[in-house]
Amino acid sequence: KKGDYKPDKKTRISDVYWTTEQWIYDLTFPYMYEANKIAGWNLDIKAAESMQITRYKKGGFYKFHKDGNCDHLSAYDNPGNPFMHGHVRKLSMSIILNDNFEGGAFEFASYGKEECSITPIEAKAGDIIFFCSGMEHRVAPVTKGIRYSLVNWFVGPPVR
């Protein structure tokens, strides 16, 4: 189903679709729990948002951005949805669904000594990337083919 995604061609060029298929949550939650433990984050995760299926055609990209913050100011105010209300994005997930494209690298930005370092993630179809939602990241422009990914955000109470 299509969501309320409103494109801004200066920030992002992609097609976005949403799903809440339970079998996908059942498949991804164990990996999230394992990544949360092994990475040492041990974040209190209570639920997950609707999942985003993204298609980046040739020329598609998503500029550097953060998915969320763990602070109280970022908490969802949605009393009608007990899974989301009062929670914040803590962990983000991106599953690379295919690898028959060029460009489109998933990249992190990190800062030190007044310099920005860009770290591309070498990922192939089926690889799952977990990271703290406050980390800056992007999808570099696709230069050939079509890139597909499944993205989700895991939420919980704000960090104290």
Image (cartoon, rainbow, N blue to C red):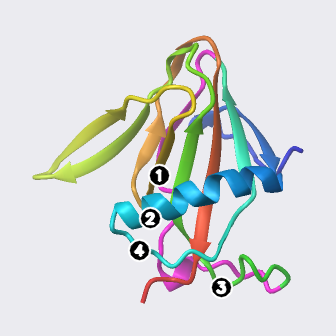
**Amino acid type assigned to the residue bearing label 3 in the image:** Gly
Q: Which residue is mark 1?
A: 130
41 up-or-down from 67: above or below: below
Name the residue carrying label 4: 42
Other-residue count near label 2 (Cα within 10 Å), few / some / many at <14 / 14–19 / ≥20: some
- For the point 36% across and 61% down, the residue is 38
Give the labeled residue for mark 2. Answer: 36
Q: Earlier in the sequence, mark 1 or mark 2?
A: 2
CA distance for labels 1 and 2: 8 Å
Asked whether the residues under the numbered discs 2 and 4 touch, taking CB atoms below 8 Å apart as contact, a structural biologist would say yes
User: Disc 1 on helix, strand or loop?
Assistant: strand
User: Magenta segment range?
Assistant: 58-79
Q: Is residue 30 visible?
A: yes
Q: How many marks?
A: 4
In the image shown, does 56 or 43 lie closer to the viewer? Answer: 43
Query: Mark 2 and mark 4: span between their CA atoms?
Result: 5 Å
Residue type at tag 1: Phe
| Residue that label 3 marks | 86
First in residue order: circle 3 vs circle 2: 2
